[in-house]
Amino acid sequence: MAPPAGQIRPAKYLASFVLIVVALYALVFLTGNGSAKPKLGIDLQGGTLVTLTARQEDGAQPSEEALNRARDLIEVRVNGLGVSGAEVVRDGNNLVITVPGADGEGAKGLGQTARLAFRKVLGQPVPAGTPATAPTSTSPAPSSSASTPPSATGESASPPPSSDAPQGRPAPNLAAQPSSTEPSSPAPSSSSAPTSTPSAPSNVDPKIAEEIQAAKAMRQSTDPQVLQQAALMLDCTQPDPLRGNDDLDKPLVTCDEKGEFKYTLAPVNPPKEDTETKADDYSNYSRLTGEDINDAVANNNPNGTGYVVNLDFKSEGGTKWAAFTSANVQQAVAVVLDGEVMSAPTIQSAITGGSTEISGKFTLKEAQNLANTLKYGALPLSFDSSEAQTVSPTLGLASLKAGLIAGGLGLALVFVYCLFYYRLLGFLTILSLILSGVVVFGVLVLLGRWIGFTLDLAGIAGFIIAIGITADSFIVFFERLKDEVREGRSFRSAVPRAWVRSRRTILSADAVSFIAAAVLYVIAVGQVKGFAFTLGMSTVLDLVVVFLVTHPLVALASKSKFLSNPKFSGLGGAARQGAAHRASVAGKPAAVKEV
Amino acid sequence: MSSVFSRLYVGNGAFDIVGKRIRWYIVSAIILLVCIGSMIFQGFNLGIDFKGGTKIALPSVSASGEAISAAAVEDVFAKAVPGKRPTSVQAVGTGDSATIQLKSSTLEQAEVTALKSALVQDLNPRGGQGSVSDSLVSASWGGEISGKALWALFWFFVLVAVFLIFYFEWQMAVGALVAVFHDVIITAGVYSIVGFEVTPATVIGLLTILGFSLYDTVVVFDKVKENTMGLLGLTRRTYAEASNLALNQTLMRSINTSLIALLPVLGLLIVGVGVLGVGTLQDLALVQMVGMIVGALSSIFIATPVLVDLKLRDPKYVAQAKRVAARRAKATGPQVAEGVESTDDEALTADLRKEKAMAAAASVPHRTAKSGDARRRPTGKRHR
């Protein structure tokens, strides 16, 4: 049956709402992992949260590029802790590290600057997967130019005006010259790890500190035998406790970025107690760190296909680089970031002048990545720990419970008030609020999955406050309805009039609320963001519910003889007044319409 | 003849709010002065998030079921971190959520680690090592949060002003913003006077009051706009009277919406204080509570009166008010204001007709029609 003109078709609206809900929950249950749980913040599930704020020495705004690079680096470090579910998120100039669960204490020491250094490669890199077959090349014996490629990518470093050495080919790496030049001059007398650990952050918890010490004793030993042993035992799939904690004046056994090869590397600087090595001895020591680099960019390979990285040293760095490369032609040098080999090109010739070209079979992305590593390895940013907090799971659970109880209590109070004041309309309010809650929950789960939105305590508070705002739009509508009935209209004819008028008010009032939430979200940091997001989201969903549920339901109720009985609708008082108004209007017909 | 409640309910303009606006201005000026004075001379009780510091919380029950006293915690602190003293140690919360909260100046991360293990060893709280929460905040962090909050405030004002000028008119935008400003200052002032702790959650709450206070004002102004449509061509009532009528008509609505919005906040406050003792929930609830009450009052007593004053600077409205007075002087006998009525019937009928046409023409759910179109249609009725 076609609806009478001027009436809406409530069933259509309700059906479209049901469709939305069904689609929403189909997405919730059928995509992703199918678990209907929103992602909870650290303050609700327990865990560690560290906020690092970028500070530049001159106080300038850090560049986007540097911040993103720092985020990636710190994420690698966090994953190195071996805890699951850890995340690093950029928030303006801040990096927020969250580690759920009880073992996130280690995350508090991650803010130190990433260290880039150049280390000479000793011996042949060992494929990481097969530790048992490869040990021969690490022996100091002068193997007659092993034919295996020195690195997975066959990279080489040369001055940019290309030298006559063919580039991009797997350069035959003359293995490190015999032990005569090994840095064993200080003698492995004290082969146990030295007590001084200058680079280790002082603020990690004792268990991790112990692991670092143990790893150092093996992988940074000054005894070649121990190093060889360490290279055998090293497992590249495990998190590396030495990440960013290695000592620059000791050799290092480590893996490359992809976990494909294991390298034995020379120290960057001679040990402090070593007085025999002359200051101009570059045969083993590169004496170069990321601070010596001026710039690095990825470019097209001028001599062929693929990409190269052009590296430019600062003046002092260029001098050191020249001395090092001339002492180590046809040797491999490793670019080591936080104790991990990023690239190990072979030096084709002495490189003077500070400009260097690293070539290899790079894709554009790999080349850019390497250039970024070289450029930002020693971050141009330093990070201050703005906030470091650990929430115990018990406290988190208590907060979650308290938040839910508060929400329940708030909702109950609103229910009682609505029932008392609006009766039948109160029921519709409750129904609308519940449906609104259903939609909000579904959206929350999906947003947690899609954009990593986490619900924290402030967010819960946002929802609770939004209950009031949602209910407000119903009240605006109902009060309008009362006005119309008071003017003498029947419930049924009052509904469309009241709706047209209140719709405008609801839209404008919600628009203001939404502006408030949006501004907060865009500008604010930390907790404020979560709160603003939930508030803004529930404002939008409020409109959906008012338009698709509340109004159609009221329209339906107004058509039912039984339900529109003033006793149920709570409009009795207004209706009586309306009757009186009608009577008075009938008495003096000219009084209302003014001229 | 009528009780306050029925006058409220009927909303026939029985409360002369606009007429007595000077009174409200004076009252609010006094309150504002007190608040600003307190903010200048007394300042705020800033939490550790603004000053920087360390906060540690542990369950106040040990694994063996005994209560852990604040004094015991203080002793452990003195032992684990020699040379420093906690600024406060207090027991908060109830039941399972009862905790002991310890605050001190900023400690080194190593000191926090040492303190935590000492607390676990000596006091053995229920839940062991994992049950101790800590939070370390640098002083600059709070500065960043509040700095951003001030920016948010600024942009909010700009955007809302643009929205209101576009949607209503500039006088209404000014009236609404004056009211919001008034709310923010009074809420902040209450915090300063009472000495509640200011945390980032408080700042969040303060910012959302803005939205709420405007919500209320927008509802009232919407009615004012409706009541004063085409007013200049009539001599029935002045702008001040029409606004006052709008205020009265929306009074019950304002009270209702504020009450309903307050109820969940009340729940938040009860749970925040009763169960957890301290923290985000309580801070947010407190500031919202104060802000909502002030916001509801200001949308009634400040926003509309300011709007009327601004409007009456316009000679057109002054002239119209004179005409009204002149007509009343001529008329015999007192004029009784009509009860509830609408003056935008024409626009409404046009809207309704449009809607009817759309519902009849299409079987798709109707879209929101542009009301401007409806008004341009020739209706055959007189236009003013």
Image: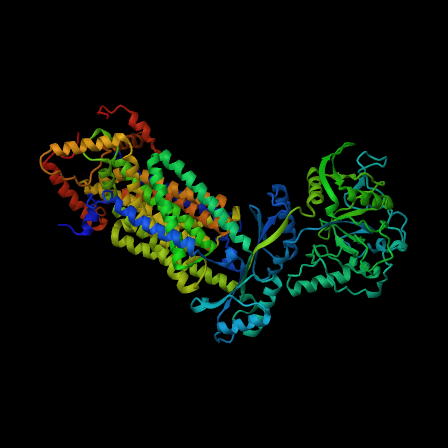
Q: Quadrant of the C terminus of chain A?
A: top left
- The number of callouts visible is 0
In the rendered structure, the answer to whether residue A198 lies left or right of residue B370 reads right
In the rendered image, which quarter is residue A373 located in?
top right
Left or right: A41 as drawn, with respect to A542: right
Residue A525 x/y as whole percent = 51, 48
Write down the quadrant of residue A585 in the picture: top left
Who is closer to the viewer here, A127 or B30? Answer: B30
How far from the left and from the top, in percent, is residue A321?
A: 81, 44
Residue A179 seen in the figure: yes
Q: Nearer the viewer, residue A561 or A84?
A: A84
Q: Is residue B24 above or below residue A457?
A: above
Rendering coords of residue A329 (x, y %): 86, 44
Give x and y (percent) for residue A1. Answer: 27, 36
Along the line of sight, the residue nearer the viewer: A447 or A557: A447
Is residue A499 visible in the rendered image? The answer is no
Q: Residue at x 9, y 37 (%)?
A: B333
Q: Is residue A455 left or right of residue A303?
A: left
Quarter of the image where one finds residue B239: top left
